[in-house]
Amino acid sequence: MSHNPYRVAVTSSSDFPVRIDIAEKALSGIAQVVNEDMPFRSLSPEEEAQYGERLADYDGLLVRAGVFSEGVLKRLKSVKVIAVHGAGVDQVDVACAERLGIHVANAPGCNANAVVELTMGLMIDLVRRISSSAVRVSRDKEWGEARYLGSELSGRTLGLVGFGRIARGVATRAQAFSMKVSAVDPYVSAEQMASEEVRCYSNLEDLLSASDIVSLHIPAVPETHHLINENRIEVMRQGALLVNTARGTLVDEKALYKALNSGHLGGAALDVLEEEPPGSANPLMALDSVIVTPHLGGSTREALAAIAQVASEQIRSVLEGEVPKYAVNCPVPNRAQ
């Protein structure tokens, strides 16, 4: 058996598993892989110290569960690289990691197809009320009363906020349902969208006012916090539907509840929330017009396998003295040697 000079921790939980077997194979010969259970929520100062000390002697982290604030990162004296299990890196203070000389990388695109398919499923569920009908049949033993009158996707206008890999996949599937697709994304040209038969909007409000269904596909950064707020919801069409499979902080939930409760919006499907899991007082949970799923966008066997492979490859690159392919920061190399 070859000697493994490094140690890598995989932070996971029962709710957020990682394919450890794939990580072990990808890091074979260079690192021992150890699973470390960690909650997926903000930590108290005492917990930051606890988990920081527990993880301090590892050389790399493959992070699915856990929130890595400065209080944790500053204690990771041996960690050279953090690879996030997925595309979004908002659970890691990337700027702090950079100051500390820690590489941060992600695994973009690995769960794209899974999120695309969930987005389409949620849209279909919203217009046909499939899950609500199924619950009334199975739980309430109803039949005729559970036969809700729905609508069809065909002919409706879908507005995509963001036009990256996931949004492009949604656009292709939506077009197969004979939907008209529009998008807004400052980083994608009108010519590129036109080549994919997607109408380009330069202004978010114009897109919102022209869409029957709005689907969010942008990252959580300070500039996108509560992007969908009361003012922007007001310009959406009467009875419009909102789908969010991106990040919970994109939507002002109080404003969304107000619009749904008043009937201005016809429904919402949310795979992500501002607080996960939601508190018992979250009023959205009581609305029949809302579908909530437990952040399962990337939870497919295929996606978990692909993410574990790519994230492990990022760690291996750093441990071998290379820059990771999917680096999201550029640290001073005081630890990466």
Image (cartoon, helix red, strand yellow):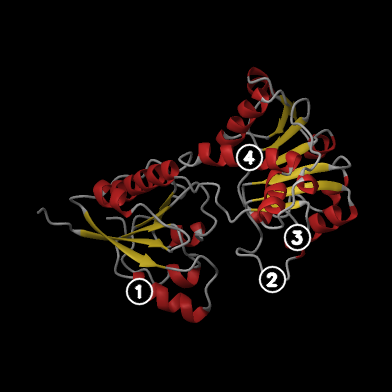
Q: Mark 4 or mark 1: which is in front?
A: 4
Residue type (three-letter) at the residue carrying disc 3: Leu
Earlier in the chain: of badge 3 and badge 1, it is 1
Q: Residue at x 55, y 51 (%)?
A: 296
Q: Say what amino acid the circle numbered 2 marks.
A: Ser
Which residue: 31% across, 56% down? 336
Tell me the number on the disc at residue 54: 1
Mark 1 or mark 2, earlier in chain: 1
- Residue 121's tag is 4
> Residue 233: in sight, yes or no?
yes
Which percent across, then down, holds residue 103?
Answer: 39, 54
Q: Is residue 250 visible?
A: no
Mark pair 1, 2: CA separation: 32 Å
Where does residue 220 sit, x and y in percent of width and height?
62, 52
Q: Which of the 4 quarters of the picture holds residue 258?
A: bottom right
Q: Amino acid at mark 1?
A: Arg
- CA–CA distance between discs 2 and 4? 26 Å
Residue drawn 64% across and 23% down? 176
Q: Which mark is residue 284?
A: 3
Q: Quadrant of residue 190?
A: top right
Please tell me the numbered disc located at residue 280: 2
140 or 331, nearer to the observer? 140
Give the crowd class for mark 2: few <14, some 14-19, many >=20 residues within 10 Å: few
Judge depth for marks 3 and 1 and give the one in front.
Answer: 3
